[in-house]
Amino acid sequence: MDRKLKRGDRLVVASHNPGKVQEIQELLAPCGVDAVSAGELGLPEPEETGTTFAANSQLKALAAAEASGLPAIADDSGLEVDALGGAPGIYSARWAGKSKDFCFAMMRVHNALEQEGALTPGARRANFTCALTLAWPDGAGDTFEGKVFGTLVWPLKGTRGFGYDPMFLPDGAIETFGQMDPDTKHAISHRAKAFEQFVAACLEK
Ligand code: IMP
């Protein structure tokens, strides 16, 4: 798309997940855009009715852009576990229940893997996927996707990050996302990979 964001432009971060908003704002910081969260603007949280990460990121970005009259960026992401046929996938947040308890969600994943007899690292392969959409108030938009591959460990390791971070050991790393400092995670994460493409395509040089 020809339209680009410039330094100083206001951009809505269309998420109500504080961990995600923080990561997106950290990734946006060097770009010089003025990032404000959907929560701060009091925007409603649309229902995620899509069947793919891309479709859900598009509907969230579009809803925020239309409601605010500003460009909006939304991320839809999740954990896909090979031995579970890609679950929890787009339902990653829902696996944590109403109370958003990710220790419970990680225990659910671990129990499901045990039931499948997936006990070795090779049987516990997984990836995080992130679809990132930039939408404009007139309905135009672009979507970018990033993935990071790794294995799921048990017991959990680390208390940093959010969501499923303490059980995800990225390939080639010696620490889980839950143990890493944020800059190390930002250098390799699914979100960072989608962001690189977004910055190259949507931000004025
Ligand atoms: P949604 O995109 O709002 O539907 O939520 C995605 C869910 O996937 C989050 O609530 C997290 O549980 C999980 N998730 C996405 N990205 C990450 C990540 O970087 N680390 C850990 N969990 C993640």
Image: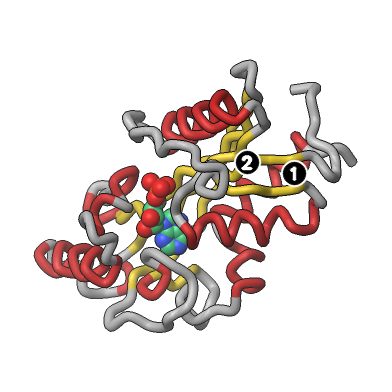
The Cα atoms of the two marked residues, 2 and 1, are separated by 15 Å
Figure check: 94 above or below 182: above
> How many marks can you see?
2
The three-letter amino acid code for the residue at tag 2 is Val
Quadrant of res 155: bottom left
Viewer-nearest of discs 2 and 1: 2
Relative depth, front residue between 31 and 123: 31
**Who's the residue at 50% across and 28% down the image?**
63
39, above or below 54, in the image: below
Pinpoint residue 170: horizontal percent, then vertical percent. Answer: 48, 69
Task: Mark 1: give few (<14), some (14-19) or many (20+) Cα within 10 Å.
Answer: some
Percent position of residue 5, x then y: 79, 35
Question: Which quadrant of the rendered structure holds the C terminus?
Answer: top right
SS for dot 2:
strand
Image quadrant holding the N terminus, namely top right
- Which residue, given by chain and number where applicable, does mark 1 sit on? 199
As displayed, is residue 124 above or below residue 179?
above
Tell me where residue 46 sits by quadrant.
top left
On residue 2, the disc is: none
Q: Is residue 50 left or right of residue 94?
A: right
Point out residue 21 in the picture as x, y percentages from the top left corner: 55, 55
N-terminal-most mark, 2 or 1:
2
Regarding residue 163, the answer to whether it shows in the image is yes
Residue 12: give its label: 2
- Indicate the secondary structure of the residue bearing disc 1: helix
> Residue, x 21% and y 68% (percent of image)?
104
From the viewer's perspective, is 30 left or right of 168? right
Q: Is residue 127 visible?
A: no
Going by the picture, which residue comes out furthest to the right?
A: 205
